[in-house]
Image (spheres, grey):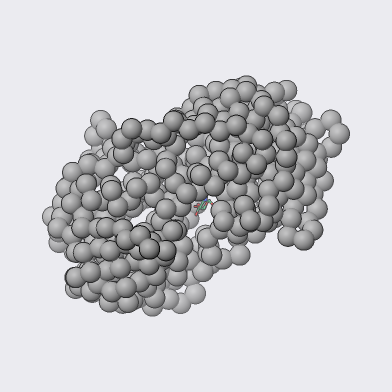
Amino acid sequence: MDRIRIRKAARLQGEIPISGAKNAALKLMAACLLTSEPLVLSNVPRLADVRAMADLLKSFGVTVERTPGTSLGEGDTYRFQAGTIASSFASYDMVRKMRASFQVLAPLVARHGEAKVSLPGGCAIGARPVDMHLKALEALGAEVSLADGYVLAKAPKGGLVGGRIEFSKVSVGATETALMSSVLAKGKTEIGNAAREPEIEDLCLCLIAMGAKISGLGSGRLIVEGVKELHGATYAVMPDRIESGTYAIALALTGGELELIGARRDNNTALYDLLDRAGTDIQETKRGIRLYRNGAPPAAVEVTTAPFPGFPTDLQAQLMALMTIAEGTSIIRETIFENRFMHVPELGRLGADIRVHGDVATVRGVAKLKGAPVMATDLRASVSLVLAGLVAEGETIVNRVYHLDRGFDRLEEKLRAVGADIVREKE
Ligand code: UD1
């Protein structure tokens, strides 16, 4: 398995192009199943999860053509065509590797009438049930059963029928399931307590480009008027706000000056406001966001993860890496996923002082981290170790980095280009 070797960095300086958003791209890819015409997606990030989703789509009979981008800043372009759906079976082997592949369930049922999809695996960050996805499908008339680790869902004879879906808690994935189930359903669907993450809006905009009728974008109540069929479209994936947030935190750690090309402050106000308070200068530019920091330790913060527009759980581990060297004691509360503090013992190996009680981590800032071998556990946890490695004295070796390749497009290349001392060792 590959590992990454990092030596303490000088200040980061320069610009980093932000790739297309993983969490948007994967769902837009699944949306190709809703039409027999081609869906062309540009700005697709180069990630293991994207390749896994493309393979899964191929197994249903979708033709997939990829045109690689020619620079770090240009994403790949994919053309997907689900002319006929030859199979609607997603095996355990496919789905366990990546939870997002569960998102094929709704478009398969909506267009093909039925699907058998394995219950998901994905990151080891808690139980992560799919009950709300299934309730959404049932609300539109699907018959859903569970057997041997698989979900079997069937639309009624004439297809899914619009209805009312009221979620008991905010879920990104379940909102996407509700959207993809309802765009081809007969009549109107109302989705209450919908997630408001920008990736949901991206999916709505792509579906609208394909002929769907959706209103209430950006709000917690989405209204879908079902249409008979959707058509092909060309759509550019939104920039990844978790990737840009991660590099913003990297800059706050090392000091220096970075321009994040394509980043948007309004996609991540919670993070940028917090970095601002902790002492980083942030300016919106024509091309993205410019950050400047003089290298003094950041001020400690108190933060609670929450659904958008709250502080994203996908940046919690990275923020914690920053707070390990803050002046004072930070309190970080994780409310979205249980078991999402797996980076804590690894950061501890680098000299961080972190105590966890239930869903709260108390981080006492230390003057210095010291490099050591550490183990990547999940996607966001792994990148937090890379960030800590940028400021740890000496050398940090991050083992088991395949998690990083799932979600960060050419991370070492991007960091090296702005002055980091980071190399990958193949095994
Ligand atoms: C998506 C993102 C993930 C991010 C998360 C929260 C993708 C591929 N992944 O994950 O990176 O961390 O949003 O922003 O887009 N829940 C249930 N029942 C369900 C569904 C969810 O109880 O049927 C719970 C989950 O266990 C969790 C909470 O709802 O506690 C939020 O999860 P959800 O928003 O669904 O996360 P994902 O869509 O899986």
Ligand 1 placement by image quarter: bottom right
- The quarter of the picture where the C terminus appears is bottom left
Taking the image as shown, residue 328 lies to the left or right of residue 224, namely left
Q: Eyeballing the image, is 330 above or below 14?
A: below
Q: Please say whether residue 275 is visible from this viewpoint.
A: no
Report the front residue among 71 and 241. Answer: 71
Residue in view at x 58 percent, y 43 percent: 55
Residue 425 vs residue 178, the one in the foreground: 425
The answer to whether 59 is drawn above or below residue 151 in the figure is above
* Image spot of residue 197 (x, y percent): 49, 44
Quadrant in the picture for residue 86: top right
For residue 148, which quarter of the picture? bottom right
At horizontal 39% and vertical 75% (from top left) the residue drawn is 345
Q: How many marks?
A: 0
Say which residue appears at 60% left-offset and 34% top-offset: 31
Residue 121 falls in image quadrant: bottom right
Q: Residue 147 appears at what percent x and percent y?
A: 79, 58
- Residue that extends furthest to the front in the rendered view of this protein: 427
Q: Position of residue 56 (x, y in %)?
A: 61, 44
Q: Residue at x 52, y 60 (%)?
A: 123
Q: Residue furthest toward the right?
A: 157
